Amino acid sequence: MKVLVINAGSSSLKYQLIDMDTEKAIAKGGCERIGLEGSFCKHKAKGVEKVINAPMPTHKEAIQVVLDALVDKEYGAISSMKEIDAVGHRIVHSGEAFDKSALLTDENMAIIESLSELAPLHQPANIIGVKACKAIMPNVPMVGVFDTAFHSTMPEKAYIYGIPYEAYTKHKIRRYGFHGTSHKFVSEEAAKYLGRENDENFKVITMHLGNGSSISAVKGGKSMDTSMSFTPLGGVPMGTRSGDLDPAIVEFLANKYNMTLAETLTYLNKKSGVSGLSGVSSDFRDLSEAAKNGNHRAALALDVFTYSCKKYLGAYAAALGGADCVVFTAGIGEHDKNVRAAIAENMEYMGIKIDADKNANIGDGITEISADDSKVKVLVIPTNEELVIARDTLRLAK
Ligand code: ADP
């Protein structure tokens, strides 16, 4: 069985074709500049990377380019489109309508479209991707896997804000949380690794630290709280996103810089975080380099980030009544030993102790980096959101 995983953005479309017998990607790539001049697709299969320049006025042409690439005699991965058994789509928002992945029937698509106002930058692009796929592959089952669904188990006290209750009942303003497929994947992998599958008391704090970062408290496989919020702007400061702020800052900023509300949100989404703080970069490799060379603002940006993550670690241990395990994942979590060390520093009182050598030698799979006498297991686990999407897709398509 082979599953095509699609992640459609407003002008991009990333894909992976996964062979479900081995759970390995046999082809992957991405189309960029959809709807613009100079659109192209970077396709990789059989160890060869190919750049395909082709006009892609809409996502439909982009999907066609991807399918043509997948069956290409020279650089393809399959002999015919018939080998694609199902397509899994990453969908940002499930609102309160779905608590798990769902078949993309016309009825479910209507619900997904009605949720667009909750994620106006991403949901419409996801929907366009689904429609384009359906038009070209009308007989292939399509499944939607939501970024928010894993967090549907949060208790009310974790998702309700301290504003009038009608804002929730009338306008659906609440914490939703994101990166759900990643938090689900790594928390399950951690439970398996530690022999705690199906253990309702297994408490793990998952730190997905990448361009976008979020931290979750997971108990017995269920999300109990998470740092991203109504939108992916909330929580810890990120590459270019501010993370949590005093809400009064929004108006103050708008007045000081003479910005509209929309411009102020762009400022908080695109110009803030460690990039805005450091004035150097949103990439943690650049920040460490600059900090090493004495750049105070780069060092400060790293401090602000790791301090914020550390506070969530403490908060979620309090929320869960302790923690059995902490997981680091995503670009920074998997690759930046200094960030991991800074977050876990001085937390021995809570049973968290990292072994410096183990932390500096991360393998390909799961790496345990806690010291032998650490009460809490600390693991680095490479995330694989595409695999979660493919597994759910296969299960539902069957
Ligand atoms: P996303 O999927 O959200 O775009 P990733 O999870 O791929 O992001 O994370 C990307 C970030 O990971 C980069 O911006 C960079 O800061 C960080 N990163 C990647 N590799 C390394 C590394 N070797 N050392 C430190 N940071 C790294």
Image: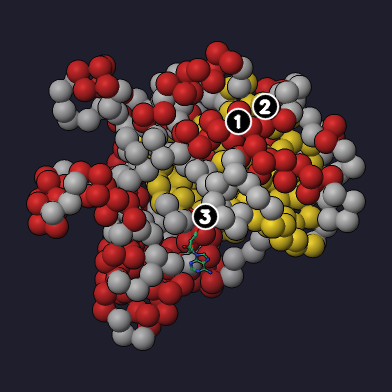
The secondary structure type at the circle numbered 1 is helix
Say whether residue 226 is left or right of residue 262. Answer: right
Is label 3's Cβ within 8 Å of ligand 1? yes
The secondary structure type at the circle numbered 3 is helix
Distance in Å between CA atoms under marks 3 and 1: 26 Å
Residue depicted at x 79% and y 34%: 84
For disc 3, the marked residue is 330
Residue depicted at x 13% and y 54%: 258
Say whether residue 114 is left or right of residue 20. Answer: left
Is label 2's Cβ within 8 Å of ligand 1? no
Residue depicted at x 68% and y 27%: 135
The mark found on residue 134 in the picture is 2
Q: The residue under label 1 is which amino acid type?
A: Val
Q: Earlier in the sequence, mark 3 or mark 2?
A: 2
For disc 1, the marked residue is 130
Colour setup of the view? secondary structure
Relative to 312, residue 374 above or below: below
Dot 2 alpha-carbon crowd within 10 angstroms: few under 14, some 14 to 19, many 20 or more: some
Q: Nearer the viewer, residue 48 or 289?
A: 48
Q: The residue under label 2 is which amino acid type?
A: Lys
Q: Earlier in the sequence, mark 3 or mark 1?
A: 1
